[in-house]
Amino acid sequence: MELRHLRYFVAVAEELHFGRAAARLHMAQPPLSQQVRALEAELGVALLHRTTRRVELTAAGSAYLQRARAVLGELDDAAHEAQQVAAGVVGRLVVGCVGSATYSLLPLLARGLTRELPGIEFSFRGEMLVPDQVLALQGNDIDIALLRPPVHDTLIQTSILRHDRLVVAVPDDHPLAARRRVRVAQLADVDLLVHAGRPHSVMHAEVVRLCRQAGFEPRFRAEVGETSTLITLVAGGLGAAVVPEPVTALPIQGVVYRPLVGGGRVALAVAHRRDREEAHLRRAVEAVRRLVDPS
Amino acid sequence: MELRHLRYFVAVAEELHFGRAAARLHMAQPPLSQQVRALEAELGVALLHRTTRRVELTAAGSAYLQRARAVLGELDDAAHEAQQVAAGVVGRLVVGCVGSATYSLLPLLARGLTRELPGIEFSFRGEMLVPDQVLALQGNDIDIALLRPPVHDTLIQTSILRHDRLVVAVPDDHPLAARRRVRVAQLADVDLLVHAGRPHSVMHAEVVRLCRQAGFEPRFRAEVGETSTLITLVAGGLGAAVVPEPVTALPIQGVVYRPLVGGGRVALAVAHRRDREEAHLRRAVEAVRRLVDPS
DNA sequence: TAAAAATACTCCATAGGTATTTTAT
DNA sequence: ATAAAATACCTATGGAGTATTTTTA
């Protein structure tokens, strides 16, 4: 069976006259009759009851007419939808986000993206470690990643969004909590909590670099996956943690944040697979850039 | 566009390999490639992203694949449905019923028909006058009529179901209410209510015939459309009414029914258009016959 | 008898096949 | 170097056209 059969049958069913239906289809009457008969033969069902004076639908024909119309309509819809998806107007995207930006950035993006690209269905995965994000991008498990560069994979395109200052998260009864600001040197004999992960996270590496620069080796107490857990352990008094400033958007009872003087900055970037050029992905990446830096 | 394009695209999308898809479709690879490209050209959308090493769906392709699968599935369903309708297993039928049988027969048929022919969707129109039923059959507004013969139309096939005795409906304070049975002669000086309609209803003609046979002319007080209204007017004291016995299934406060001695009988028949030979109609008529006369 | 569908046949457009080339890994 | 898709070209099926017949109201 082919769509031709459906189109012809619908035309005849609507005209109830092979001659007029053929005219409407810009074809001759005999092949139209043939194709409709072929359809009936294939279905094994009489769709039309013909005399030379009158053509009328059988009960089966009525039922099939409805369905045939529906199918033809859905096919049009399908074409439109595909075109819209191709144009990037509609689609589905998964956004991954590194832990330290989860609580400040994701709410902003969730609101902003769904507002600016209403045809695209977004879902979000927060608290991801950077290496996992890279793997997820490679496997198309996520489409866009918000991560801390650098990423050593030529397949992944990254673009820096902004630089975040560092702060130190300490329990509120910790000696450092009494100070307005913390210098790197003051971390010398403090237990530090860092993110887990092989290879070590960007923050982990940055803390090591800063401490060595200040002339000492940092004392790591524990490695933790999620930023929320990290801060919870700080609240529990296990130690302090050096984190990017946006983490302060996560207010945990018993934890205070103090600027880290001379602590440098860590970049935040948006990343996606370089070989994916869908319009909706490009639009969404653009929207992320605009939403993070409205300038 | 033709269904071929959908089938081919679905095969390629499922195999993600033109060669294997072609094998599955029992055809060579080049024409498959051509047809899929033709589909993309017609839609104006790239559905597949091809390298010589890998074939993958674009976002638009994913969307279209879902829709294409759905369309192909629905087409199968449509064929099945048409076959079922043709076989008379499923369908839709409207049953019309004359007023005097509405309250005894329709409840029975409503239950019985939906039980015996569960695929067929029945609807019922009660309180119809016989001439209106004939018109409705002619116009295919109803498919089956339960009426009082004769019907003078060669297009309509009627088949007698049973014969109903006549009874007299009288107000409970009427002199005739005191009697166990009523003879025709006793209707001589009684106001009678009858059904309206041009030509006169079968019951109307039968009452005139009986009275003249007994040597007097009946005194008609009012003409009414629906049997329920007729009985209500009897309850209101406007007069008596000669009705077929099944009307007693309609118990109205203040009305009593008394057998009409020597009153003859009126037939009840099932009728349908002779030129309609659909299986579901024939089955339904058969079922009506069985349900009315279970012998 | 006249209008309309079915039949008989003819033709050519195009779906599909074969052989080969191109391309990306 | 190789696997796989694209291209080029050819073949032949079958969809559509023309002429005619059949049917029924």
Image (cartoon, coloured by chain):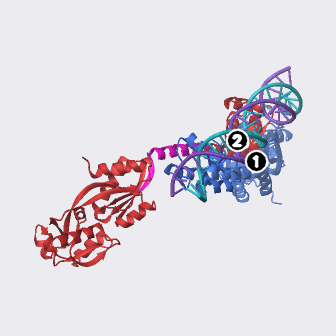
Chain colours: A blue, B red, C cyan, D purple
Local packing at callout 1 (Cα closer than 10 Å; few below 14, some 14-19, many 20+) is few
The single residue placed furthest to the left in the displayed view is B179
Chain letter of mark 2 equals B
What amino acid type is highlighted by mark number 1? Answer: Glu
**Which of the 4 image quarters holds residue A227?**
top right
Left or right: where does residue A76 sit relative to residue B156?
right
Chain letter of mark 1 equals B
Q: Residue C17: x, y in percent? A: 75, 28
- Give the alpha-carbon distance from disc 2 to disc 1, as whole Å: 10 Å
Look at 41% across and 51% down and name the residue there.
Answer: B281
Task: Identify whether B22 is placed above or below B9.
Answer: above
Instruction: State the mark number for residue B115.
Output: none
User: Can I make out residue B284 in this image?
Assistant: yes
Assign the magenta stretch its main secondary structure.
helix
Considering depth in this image, is B52 or A282 the residue closer to the camera? Answer: B52
Q: Which residues are magenta?
A: B72-95
Q: Are marks 2 and 1 in contact (CB under 8 Å)?
A: yes
**Label 2 belongs to which residue?**
B5
Considering depth in this image, is A152 or A51 the residue closer to the camera? Answer: A51
What amino acid type is highlighted by mark number 2? Answer: His
Identify the secondary structure beneath mark 2. helix
Instruction: State the mark number for residue B42.
Output: 1
Task: Identify whether B200 is placed above or below A107.
Answer: below
Look at 30% across and 69% down and name the residue there.
Answer: B201
Q: Earlier in the sequence, mark 2 or mark 1?
A: 2
